[in-house]
Amino acid sequence: MAGHVGPEWSVTIDRNGRSRWRGIRIKTCHDEEERQRLTILQDEFTLEMTMIRMNLEHLLKRYSDQLEASSRGEQHFQSPILTMDDAEALAIDRAKRLYARAYQLQTGWL
């Protein structure tokens, strides 16, 4: 079925937040056009994950004092209330969209 990606796709996230694709379907695909389409999807996903990870790392670094204080149960912080810059806000939005798209791919809705 064109566009269906099911159990033959697997993505794992390692300890550093990096994704690992296991594209069995790419390796076993005999249709060159479909293989190319799937490879492009894989590359787009990897690029998107990299951008999201970099921006979230930046956000966490900027507010590490607040996060640490919050984990200790403190309610008052030295730095201002959490505000995201444009790239960080975009990363959050893209993470939500990426999750929805991955779900659609795995359930055959895309």
Image (tube, helix red, strand yellow):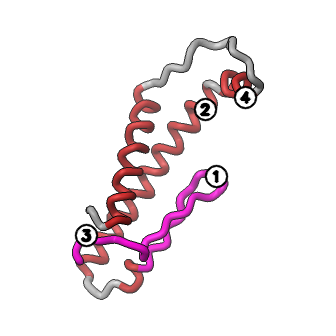
The quadrant the N terminus occupies is bottom left
First of labels 2, 1 by sequence position: 1
Kind of element beneath mark 1 = loop
Q: Which residue matches tag 2?
A: 60
Whether residues under marks 2 and 4 lie with C-beta atoms below 8 angstroms apart, the answer is: no
The quadrant the C terminus occupies is bottom left
Residue 85 vs 24, above or below: the answer is: above
Q: Which residues are magenta?
A: 1-24
Q: Which residue matches tag 1?
A: 16
Looking at the rendering, which quadrant does residue 72 occupy? top right
How far is mark 3 from mark 2, CA to CA?
A: 36 Å
How far is mark 4 from mark 3, CA to CA?
A: 43 Å
Whether residues under marks 3 and 2 lie with C-beta atoms below 8 angstroms apart, the answer is: no
Q: Which residue matches tag 3?
A: 3
Residue 10 vs 30, above or below: the answer is: above
How far is mark 2 from mark 4, CA to CA?
A: 13 Å
Q: Which residue matches tag 4?
A: 71
**Residue occupying image coordinates x 43% and y 71%:** 9
Tag in front: 2 or 4: 4
User: Dot 4, crowdedness within 10 Å: few (<14), some or many (≥20)?
Assistant: few
Residue 21 x, y percent position in the rendering: 49, 67
Kind of element beneath mark 4 = helix
Residue 95 vs 21, above or below: the answer is: above
Residue 20 x, y percent position in the rendering: 54, 64
Tag in front: 4 or 3: 4
- Indicate left or right for 21 with 41 as reference: right
In the image, 49 versus 67, the foreground residue is: 67
Tag in front: 4 or 1: 4
